[in-house]
Image (tube, helix red, strand yellow):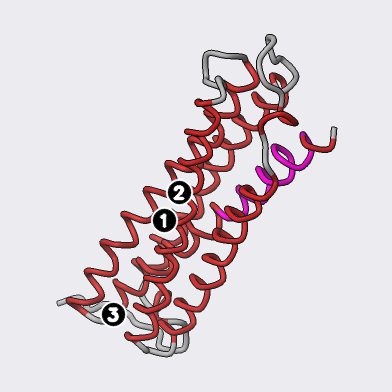
Amino acid sequence: MSTKVVDTSLPLEYQTEQSKMNILGFWIFLGAEIILFATLFAVFFVLSERFAGGPTPQELFEIKDVLIETVLLLTSSFTCGLAIYEMRRSNVKGLLTWLIITLLLGAGFIFMEVSEFIHYVDEGATMQTSAFLSSFFVLLGTHGAHVSLGIGWATMIIIQILKRGITPVTARKTFIIGLYWHFLDVVWIFIFTFVYLARMVS
């Protein structure tokens, strides 16, 4: 009968070969995600000056709302890191607390982004208005969809932790969602810098 080899000198999420392979596989998946977002950024940069008589970034973007979105998402990255820290301390209550706070911040970000999109549409800025707005909505919509997926995914992990506690499997899943969440925050930093700030001052 075969037994699983467990290396207790490593963090819980890395202690089995299966976990190591799953985490490696997720890093490869993130590589594909980088290609996806790089493509969307490239399309945006090519089309960002094609307004077709529609609203320009200077007319649409409001730095206050974008800053709130940024603070919410970057703070959620910090709380996600605290969740991983508590997981490695085998503190179920701390892990769940910080994960839930992370999801609430993420939900706040999505609420702000949807409100922003509704405001733009009310101003007559839709995907059909110009090539700039088409590429803008696709880029930000793809990122927002990823954040929404992350919220649902992390919710299922929270349910598993409530049922099973912190195990090598739930630790691996929590660590992977943490990688995913940090990746989305990095993408947002690029969006904030090159889509919003750069267009506001140009």
Decide: marks 1, 2 in contact (CB < 8 A)?
A: yes
For residue 107, the mark is: 1
Q: Main secondary structure of the magenta part?
A: helix
> Does residue 55 lie above or below 179 as drawn?
above
Q: As drawn, which residue projects farthest toward the top?
A: 52
Which image quarter is the N terminus in?
bottom left
Task: Please provide the residue range marked out in magenta.
Answer: 185-199
Specify the amino acid type for callout 1: Ala
Foreground residue, 46 or 34? 46
Q: As drawn, which residue projects farthest toward the left?
A: 1
Instruction: Tell me the residue at 34%/77% (across/down).
Output: 96
Dot 1 or dot 3: first in sequence order is 1
Which image quarter is the C terminus in?
top right
x and y percent of residue 186 in the render? 62, 53
Instruction: Tell me the residue at 44%/45% (across/down).
Output: 146
**Quadrant location of residue 197?**
top right
**Disc 3 designates what residue?**
167
Query: Is label 2 in a helix, a strand or a loop?
Result: helix
x and y percent of residue 84 in the render? 46, 77
**Disc 2 designates what residue?**
110
> Does residue 168 lie above or below 107 as drawn?
below
